[in-house]
Image: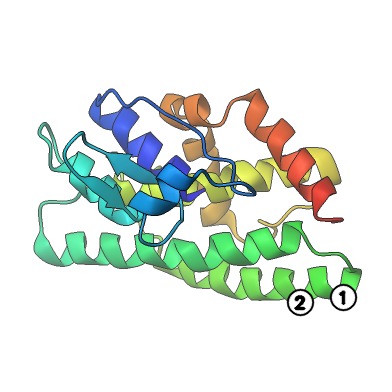
Amino acid sequence: PFVARARIVALEKGVDVDVRFIDLENKPDWFLKRSPTGTVPALDTGTDFIFESSVIAEFINELGGPSLHPEEPAARALNRAWAEFAGNLLRAQYMLMIARTQAEADRHRAALFTAMQKVETALRHAPYFNGDSFAIVDAAYAPLFVRCDFLIRTRSIDLLTGLPRLRDWGTALTRRDTVRQVHGPEHHEQLEAHMALRGS
């Protein structure tokens, strides 16, 4: 999901990125030598090796063209703060998806719902976080909603019950072309395989 955030921003900005997937179970030596954290995504500019998805998204946004942030400083700061908060939801959702027992799944689902309620309260506009303009904060949450759709279709688990603003936001995001390009059919196949590997 963190890779998806950066890839969506690149597509939105029209930046051509050559994507090379890293096997997270068997990371190549060249990658581990260059990445201080050993995590994905990382961006090789030819000169520099940039890591952390939020930093990569900001870098791509600053390359030119209309910004994917609001102009007003306080709104821009809030966008960045809520984009960072997305990581909490993505981690809780992931832990739910790989849970091996019902009790474990229930615990992670409760944590996820508590975090989702906070975002639901913060949403003031539609269809996107700031209204009509798609922003980096939208890219940060898009993978969450893609996985919510996946869980509804494959497991009949609806994580958006009682969260109408989040549901509407999620619908707008999952219908957006850039989000769909990043999350093709192979994405769902990989999710299924990963969940099976983890004994979910």
User: Residue 80 at x, y = what percent?
Assistant: 27, 62
In front of the other: 11 or 18: 18
> Helix, strand, or loop for circle 2?
helix
Q: Which colour scheme is used?
A: rainbow
Q: In this view, does 9 lie to the left or right of 185?
A: left
* Marker disc for residue 103: 1
User: Residue 5 at x, y = what percent?
Assistant: 41, 45
Q: Is the Cβ of the residue at disc 2 closer than 8 Å to that at disc 1?
A: yes
Residue at image position (26%, 46%) is 49
Residue 130 visible in this rendered orientation of the protein: no
Residue 73 visible in this rendered orientation of the protein: yes
- Which residue type does callout 2 highlight? Arg
User: Residue 12 at x, y = what percent?
Assistant: 30, 30
**Residue behind mark 2:** 107
As drawn, 44 above or below 164: above
| Mark 1 Cα-neighbour bin, 10 Å: few <14, some 14–19, many ≥20 | few
User: Which image quadrant: the C terminus?
Assistant: bottom right
Q: In this view, does 82 lie to the left or right of 80?
A: right
In front of the other: 125 or 198: 198
- Which residue type does callout 1 highlight? Ala
As drawn, 70 above or below 149: below
Q: CA gap, disc 2 to disc 1? A: 6 Å
Residue at image position (42%, 67%) is 85
Residue at image position (22%, 36%) is 45
Residue at image position (29%, 45%) is 135
User: Residue 156 at x, y = what percent?
Assistant: 84, 46
In front of the other: 127 or 2: 2
In front of the other: 103 or 198: 198
| Mark 2 Cα-neighbour bin, 10 Å: few <14, some 14–19, many ≥20 | some
Q: Is residue 145 left or right of residue 47?
A: right
